[in-house]
Amino acid sequence: DLYIIERLYSVAYTLLIITKNTLKNIEFKKKLINLIWKIEFKDKNNTKINYMIRYYALKIIEFGQKNKFCKCDFINLNKIKFNSKFYEKRVNSSKELKKKYDINYNSDPDIAKSIIYSSVVSYGDFTRYIIGTNFKSMFKWSGVRYRDKSKKLKEFDLKLAESWIFNKVMKLGWTKELHGNYDYKKSRNTNFRSTKKIERIGKKYQWLAHFEFLARVMDNYYVKNSYGQLRY
């Protein structure tokens, strides 16, 4: 479960930083760092396609390199590249997605699915502030792929992001039969602004899809800087 792995890597990185370098701790840290390197980077084709997992894994390796705890091959953290693909299919419009996934309000499970749709594709906070449709110019990546012949700057189409992420949520396995009633109850019985709420299962899949989307974009598109220039 990538959701759990990401949290474990986060905890592992935190422990590396906050624990003292006693002889016993150093041996543990060396084992941990080299294990993460073996799992994630010894063969870059096996690196998980998840932005946050990569982030914490790279921070763990960075810590190991700085403290000379890492027996692994040197990784230039500023130039490392991964090999995931991003298939830029035609963007599904909101109407097409509604029809494709039969978005309706006929039952509690159906409403639960419509909540995912609203969150990712319509006017929910997830699309506005996480995907970033409220601040399109702030999206880190350009719409120019590494393979494109023309390097003229263009903005990334966040409608593609919405469509890709919503399709991925469904492909990850969310169904109204398995998760609909649970998610509906959570959405009805939760203080939406609380920091201690139990999230919908659909929201878990939204985050997983979002972090995979970011990883694939990172592997295939130029970043844009504040001067409108392209860089890796």
Image (spheres, rainbow, N blue to C red):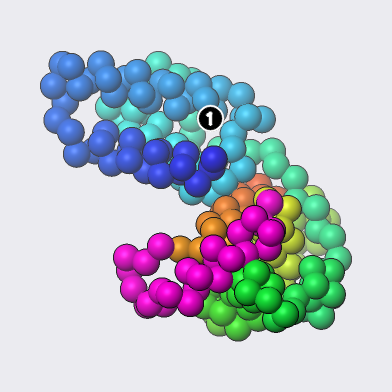
Residue 177, magenta (yes or no): yes
Image x and y of residue 85, in percent: 75, 45
Quadrant for the N terminus, please.
top right
Stretch of the chain drawn in magenta: 173-198
Front residue of 180 and 35: 180
Q: Position of residue 196 (x, y in %)?
A: 32, 65
> Which residue is at 62% across, 64% downward?
180
Quarter assignment of residue 111? bottom right
Q: Identify which residue, 204 or 40, lies in the foreground.
A: 204
Instruction: Report the residue marked by disc 1.
Output: 40
Query: Would you say residue 208 sits in the magenta stretch?
Result: no
Which residue is painted at 63% across and 38% down in the image? 82
Res. 231 image quadrant:
bottom right
Under circle 1, the secondary element is helix
Residue 122 in the figure: left or right of residue 147: left
Say which of 61 and 122 sits in front: 122
- State whether residue 2 appears in this view: yes
User: Vertically, is 42 above or below 88?
Assistant: above
Residue 109, given in percent of the width and then of the height, sits at: 65, 69
Can the viewer see residue 227 in this picture? Answer: no
Q: Residue at x 68, y 76 (%)?
A: 107
The three-letter code of the residue at mark 1 reads Glu
Residue at image coords 54%, 58%:
201
Question: How many numbered marks have been drawn onto this rendered protein structure?
Answer: 1
The vertical placement of 1 against 134, above or below, is: above
From the viewer's side, name the closer residue of 109 and 95: 109
Provide residue 156's location: percent of width, then percent of height: 69, 69
For disc 1, the neighbor class at 10 Å (few under 14, some 14 to 19, many from 20) is some
